[in-house]
Image: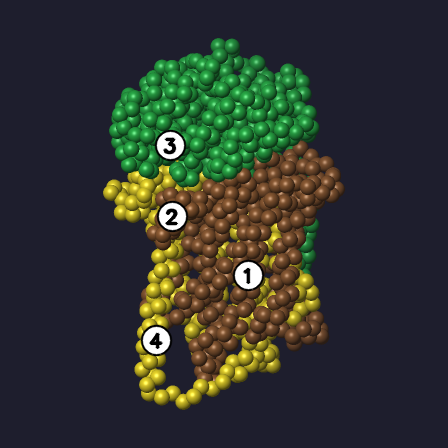
Chain colours: A yellow, B green, C brown
Amino acid sequence: MTSTARVTPRPQVRDWPLFWSKVGRIVGKVILYAVLAFGAYIFFLPFAWMVTTSLKPAAYAYEVPIQWFPKKITLDAYFYGWKTLPFPLFYRNTIIITAANIVGLVLSSSLVAFAFARIPFAGRDAWFLILLSTMMLPAQVTLIPIYLFWSKLRAVNTFWPLIVPEWLTNAYNVFLLRQFFMTIPLDYDDAARIDGASWFRIYSQIIVPMSKPALGVIAIQAFAWNWNNFLGPLIYLNETRKFTISIGLRLFQNQQSSKMPETMAMSVVALIPTLIVFFIAQRYFIQGIVITGVKG
Amino acid sequence: MFSDKLSRRHFLSGVAVAAAGMALAACAPKATPTPAAKPAQQPTAAPAQPTAAPAKKEQVTLRYMCRSGADYLPGVIKNIDEDFTAAQFPHIKVNVEPAPDGWVEKLLAQMVAGTAVDVFEAWGNIFYNWTERDLLLDLQPYVDAKMTDAEISDYNEFQWEGLFMKGKRIGMPKYINLMTLTINKDMFDKYGVDYPPENGEWNHDDYTNLLATLTEKARSKGDKNVWAGWLPGWSWDRFWNHIHMFEGKIVDQKYGKVCMMDQPEAQAALKWMYDMEWTWNYHAQPAQVENKWPGDTIAAGLVMTAEDGTYPISRNKLFRLEKGIRWDMRHVPKGPTGKRSVLGTTDAFSGTKQTKHPDETWELLHFLSGPIHQEKVIVKNNGIIPVLKSLIKKFIQIVREVEPTLQDVRLETIDEILAWGYAEDTPWFCNQVAATDIINPALQKVFTDGGADHTYFIEIAKQVTESQKDCTA
Amino acid sequence: MTEQVLETLPKRSRLTPRARNTIAGYLFILPWLVHFFMLILGAMLASLVISFTKTDLLTGFKWVGLQNYRDLFKDPLFIKSLRVTAIYTFTVVPLGVCVALSIALLLNQKVAFLGFWRLIYYLPSVVSGVAVAVLWTWVLNPRFGLLNVGLMRLGIPQDSLPRWIYSEKWAVPSFVLMGLWGAGGAMLLYLAGLQGIPTHLYEAAMIDGANAWQKFWHVTIPMLTPTIFFNMLMSIIGSFQVFTQVYVMTGGGPNNASLTIVLYLYQRGFVNLRFGYASAIAWILFFIILFFTMLVIRSSSMWVYYEGELKK
């Protein structure tokens, strides 16, 4: 990094500035927490409303001004309709699809992104641009042609249209990982190449271990996306026994009323697994990074 | 183990599949069996005379895309299994496929792929587009062959006629949603104001005065966050009946080409609506009530009256049981000349033209719209208004048995609206899409944003008429 | 298995290193190539062909050449949707980058209960689309909503408070605010990017006597530019195609004030069954996004720094 080298050295540190720098650090901390708390307040408030609303009897959900601590609390919205739909089955289906897709997506995206970031192959830049361009056409106009494709393969009402595309990766994840791979210094590859390592070995033994945070991000996002995906399952799955949770939850709302508590309860239910996964995973991948950092 | 060659072959097969994919995409439309037919062509000529039931019946499975929510689904499935398949048509099995919002896109994709469900549920404006393209099973031949006059006359005219569109019968009525005035009696009592008359003998001036009084009393008691009335005028389904009541018209005739919103009668109605909302603010402005649907605003205690569909019956739980709101329903007031009009919806069960089993599809549609399903599912299971006149009194009795607090609600209003016959189907332009493309944003400009007054529609009417110029249907 | 193939390649074959790299490259991107040729290319070409026709996809096609494109540029609603989308995109993209980056920098400090803070900031980005819409309809309520109540407390008189999604003027800014609330997704990427900066760079800077600001400006930012670049591009691509919130909350209203391109495309296609016209809209949008993407990519050599960039 040439830019860092140009920083001018500072004069010798004396005792009294040490005191002031300590005070400065404490003041900094206070400001930091204040800013964090304020931001968190703004980010959290709408979510808090979501939760309180989901706990209210429907008639109280529309009251203004809002009551943060409802006089009557009910878990009705959370249990409403669960008996009428086979939710254990929906969970099973969703877990199958989501688990398969996380594995498939992390695997395929990292392989493809590795090539775009590391291997100087002919036509690479052109293919990369094509890859990016596939994100630029609104899905609304490709929906029906793609449906047709799966329909001709008689794969409608199976999980295949929901799983195969993820195993074949997509532009977003490839691009994301490529960006991360490209921040890893080339020296590692060069050294390994001199030792006679194959591209696959560089991929599996250097790049992947060093990219745990990025792979963690991909996995979390893949989880959140697949767990909440509504349009895909809606279009491709017909029979109730094949449904996913997102469709099941949406069936809680019927066309005759807006059912605010149910809507909110459904979102909270959908959100919880994602948050648990995020909370556990963020620790893991953030630590993973620190270790690599030290090694590097 | 992979070899280089094998991988290359994989690659090639990938290309082959891709080519196949493209070819399929290109061939897509050929998959649909029926060619385009010009709408309104020979309405009486039956395309397929229903065949007499063969002696030995082949086992058939029908797919029914059902929009019922989670709480109603089991009742629907049970009723079809027991009273349709087991009791009447052992050879017809029905697979119910639940479909939440997004079903339109799903059904379209299925139609393009040639794999559409046999039976689905829809309403007015969706029918319009699909009828124009001849995507729906024409039921008229079946009606002619299999239904008696007595049976037909049990349906309400606005629905029965509304579902005969551009020369075809495109669906069998599913349930009825009518507009009434829902009132919060507690608020009337609180401010000491009399309820509107039960017999419906009142007019728009009485209505205006009533809301004025309510507003005045509320403000004088310091209640700022409550409005006397709520009419979502920006909504196509909620605005035109007032123009009809003022003897005005949206369009000169059914499938007509001249927009009449610039005429004095329509202008008077629009001026009244504008004044109610923006000049006097007796009707709430959308921003004041979060633009919530009328029922929600009553539950929230934001409004004292609301012009709303009859689904507050199903909201009794919300109003009365959860919150103790004593509510009631009344006839909307008459217009200046005594004319009255409200929307009555054309919600229906329909068959797709692609179905490979049109006869069986007809039997299912006939059953869903018939007395058994209407009573057991539409009334008892779902608690909404059935389509058969002969069931209305029974409906009132049954919902009151299920929920005794409905004794206090004047459900007889529903019976009267149907008996007096003032419910109407929505107005139809020759090119409805072009017309609503212009009218809906204008409604929002005037009634959501308040960015213009009723005179804005004089210009809009010209644009609408202009947009109908090339319509040939 | 693949490992063996690849490892044997350099030894056995007599190919030049360049050819070997090319073979390896294509083997690695094979999953995506299959995806592209099997699912994407066909659908894209189909929609391109459809854009030159008049069709509902159901009752046949009529070839009209460039008619749809010509009509579009005379269509006031399309022009309006272009303007609405452009205003939205060029507001939400830069603001979004700033907000997400600021949060990520804050959350990269040594703070107590770090996981908790991160969770809260990440949370909004995973609330499902419909719930976000319901939520924000309430937040933006002119009288009782969080936002205006907050503004009122700041002393702004009630009459001059915006009516947000109920007014033509404030509809688009409302969606910008909603977009910013979901900045947690991008924040997550910045966090991962920050974590990926090798500590030795900071140590080196410290040895050189750099202060916090200098470290930030000369180490953190350059090392984050690949992530900024990514987020910016994705944000441009995504914002130009904004749909769900608008569809649920305003349906493009009032008076088309929030009619975005994709919403208009959806109305023409799925509501009016004019798929030829809708496809033409999609392809114009495609080229608009491609143009701005290329602009960012071209400029990237000036500001994006890759530690591991391949020499051409």
Mark pair 4, 3: CA separation: 56 Å
Q: Residue visible at 61% across and 63% down?
A: C296
Question: What residue is shown with label 1?
Answer: C232
Mark pair 1, 2: CA separation: 37 Å
Q: Position of residue B413 (x, y in %)?
A: 37, 18
Q: Quadrant of the N terminus of chain C?
A: bottom right
Residue at the left extreme of this rendering: A71
- The amino acid marked with disc number 4 is Arg
Question: What residue is shown with label 2?
Answer: C157
Chain identity of mark 3: B
Question: What residue is shown with label 4?
Answer: A25
Q: Are marks 4 and 3 on the same chain?
A: no
Mark pair 2, 4: CA separation: 40 Å
Q: Is residue B300 left or right of residue B44?
A: left
Question: What residue is shown with label 3?
Answer: B295
Nearest to the eye among marks 2 and 3: give it. 2
Under circle 1, the secondary element is helix
